[in-house]
Image (cartoon, grey):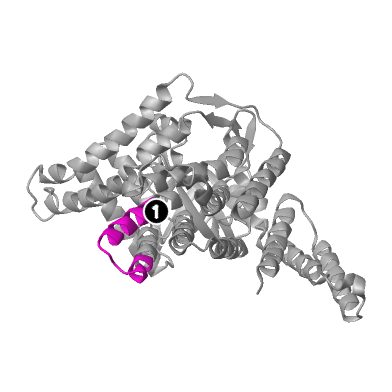
Amino acid sequence: MSARVLWVIVLGFLAGVFLRSLAALSLSFAAFFALLAAAVILLLLSGSPRFRHGILAALALFALAGGIVRMDSAVVRDDPALAARIGSGIAIEGVVSDEPDAREGSTRLLVRADALVEGGITAKIDAGILVVAPAHAAAAYGDRIRAEGVLRLPEAFDAGAGREFDYPAYLAQDGVLYELAFARDVEVVGAGKRDPVKAAALLVKRTFLEGLALALPEPAAGLAGGITVGDKRGLGAELAETFRTVSLTHIVVLSGYNIMIVIYALGWALAKARAPRALEFCMALSVALLFALMTGLAAASVRAAVMASIAAVGKMTGRLYLASRALALVAAGMVLWNPYILAFDPGFQLSVLATAGLIAFTPIVVTRLKFITPRLHVREITATTIAAQIAVLPLLLYQTGNLSLVALPANFLVLLAVPWAMLCSAIAALGGLIFSPPVLGGVEGLGVVVGFPAYALLSYIIEAAKLFASLPFASVALPAFSAWWLVPAYGALLLFAYRKNI
């Protein structure tokens, strides 16, 4: 398949998904585009010279129709029994379909509900429900639970600076259409169907976090959990806002950028040891897989691992055109699997853009940073930081309205410490499990000693973020603006990258 054909199919499919995401297009629109494509093909077969180059147009139209059909098939439909009870108190039974999200004051459970219980009578239902349970709810992934609460539809909320976040569409990507608010009497009534691989991965993640808690104090333990296994619960609202102010949110949760930095550091070590390039490739992919497993195979972390692998392998081979095609195929495959992520998942959008930026802009930026030492990958880390920031900036400004004026120096100073902080955090977790008193009769205090290097590095990251956030010019709040401004912004970036890389 030629590059032109690949891009036409991928972009056509994504355009179809995007259009159906924003407008309730009926399948007749898909049929119209498919018939139009068929007409173009018939003209081609007739030998008309005017349409001899129309095969690309036909492929684009077919792909557009396919995107509309795929998004339409993924739309979450109402359950009649539940739709009639919006605003009422109900009791449901179902299976917890993902890792519980513990927050301050509540625990959020994604439940695949299959039973509606009323007056001792059980009616069958099939719906995804977000159960907002008390903070002490003991349910885990794969548990079958019974919960009572008020059924309601999720609502969009104000994201600040005049921006609205489409929360219902965001939940719909997990098949969730309803919310059981103020849930009470959340009771585990049995074991449901669970993926054994995911269950085992989540067990490893919980054990790892327990080790961190034994070896490190807060907020260092919370940050360590975020940068290593994508845990979002330990930082607290104030510190999370500090990281957001200086555009360091991507390191708080495990991101493709974190993984890529670790892969680069590993590549540097293997290069120093004169290891063969094949081993470097294998280790890069193994590291990405390990991180995905350590996070419990969370969708965002799997996506981050895949994106990091594409960027890292593209850099190692020097074949950026292959990396860009791989990114296009992977992004299209992810959208094919879950079409909602294209228009409604900010994490997916930023991940794809950051990876594209790393592929397209890193070679351009690195040639202008010859004044920075290449030792310890300092020049490369700086170049990738700038490249990623360039690619995501327009979308970040649209989504958050937060223009961080200290993002580049903050990222540069912090990212140099990230791979070592991740390594030392892993050692700290292991030390906490082995040497702390509750486990294996460990020696009191020894786990804390093992965790000290991690504590020092994590404290450096936290204090650096606080220092930059405290500056009077750290960030500027921009008013909300139309998404149409993203078109010329990314058009200019595409044109610039194309001219510099041809």
Is 445 on the left-hand or right-hand side of 459?
A: left
Query: Which residue is painted at 71% across and 44% down in the image?
Result: 487
Give the x, y percent position of residue 184. 45, 44
Residue 278 lies in magenta, yes or no?
Answer: yes
Q: Which region of the structure is painted magenta?
A: 259-282
Quadrant of the rendering where the N terminus is positioned: bottom right
Query: Which residue is painted at 64% across and 27% down in the image?
Result: 479
Residue 497 lies in magenta, yes or no?
Answer: no
Is 487 on the left-hand or right-hand side of 292?
A: right
Give the x, y percent position of residue 265. 33, 53
Indicate the quadrant where residue 393 lies: top right
In the rendered image, the vertical position of residue 432 relative to residue 77, given as above or below: above
Residue 185 visible in this rendered orientation of the protein: yes
Residue at numbered disc 1: 259
Quadrant of the rendering where the C terminus is positioned: bottom right
Q: Looking at the magenta stretch, what is its main secondary structure?
A: helix
Indicate the quadrant where residue 378 lies: top left
Secondary structure beneath dot 1 equals: helix
Is 421 on the left-hand or right-hand side of 350?
A: left
Instruction: Tell which of 334 and 24 is nearer to you.
Output: 334
Residue 232 visible in this rendered orientation of the protein: no
Query: Which residue is painted at 88% across and 71% down in the image?
Result: 51
Give the x, y percent position of residue 435. 12, 50
Query: Which residue is painted at 40% across and 42% down in the image?
Result: 252
In the rendered image, the vertical position of residue 394 relative to residue 53, given as above or below: above
Is 1 on the left-hand or right-hand side of 245?
A: right
Looking at the rendered structure, the kind of residue marked 1 is Ile
